[in-house]
Amino acid sequence: MKSPDNSKLDKLVASARADYAKRENGYRQRALKLYPWICGRCMREFNQANLQELTVHHRDHDHDNNPNDGTNWELLCVYCHDNEHQRYIEQETSSERERAQEAMHNPFADLKSMIGKDKD
């Protein structure tokens, strides 16, 4: 049995990772120059030794929206960043649940029995 050739997949994954690193490095470096090295939520201060724990959060959750003035970014520590994304996921989930409940409401569900009562 012939083993599958994974070289194309490996190249694709390597390319995607390189593109991500390049994009992330660009806006991260700009954000670190624009803003003080402080988490925007917990106010923890960072220095060169622990700077890798400070992340760039995209306020609109669009990682391709990187204006030069940094208006879509805020610096968050890894813990606050994870918390922010978890809150976003939970908010989306609850909104979907509410929309599903609204969609299941049928104002005419009991109409036939109501019409029958008027005839009596």
Image: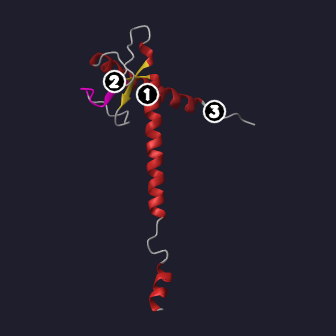
Q: CA distance from mark 3 to mark 1?
A: 38 Å
Residue 23 within the magenta-colored segment of the rendering = no
How dense is the environment of label 2, judged by Cα within 10 Å: few (below 14), some, or many (20 and up)?
A: many
Q: How far across and how far down the image is residue 10, in percent? A: 56, 29
Residue 20 image offset from top left, x and y in percent: 43, 27
| Local secondary structure at mark 2 | helix
Predominant secondary structure in magenta?
loop
Residue at which label 2 appears? 27
Label disc, if present, on residue 81 of the rendered structure: 1
Q: Earlier in the sequence, mark 3 or mark 1?
A: 3
* Amino acid at the residue labelled 1: His
Instruction: Using the image as rendered, state which of residue 105 and residue 27 is in the foreground.
Output: 105
Q: Quadrant of residue 54?
A: top left
Residue type for callout 2: Tyr
Relative to 73, say whether 91 is above or below. below
Crowding at mark 3 (Cα within 10 Å: few <14, some 14-19, many 20+): few
Local crowd size for mark 1, using a 10 Å CA cut-off: few (<14), some (14–19), many (≥20): many
Gap between marks 1 and 2 measured at Cα = 16 Å
The stretch of residues the image draws in magenta is 68-75
Q: Nearer the viewer, mark 2 or mark 3?
A: 2
Q: Looking at the image, tell me whether mark 1 or mark 2 is earlier in sequence order.
A: 2
Q: Residue beneath label 3, please?
A: 5
Q: How many marks?
A: 3
Name above or below for residue 6 compared with residue 75: below
> Given this view, does label 1 or label 2 mark the residue nearer the observer?
1
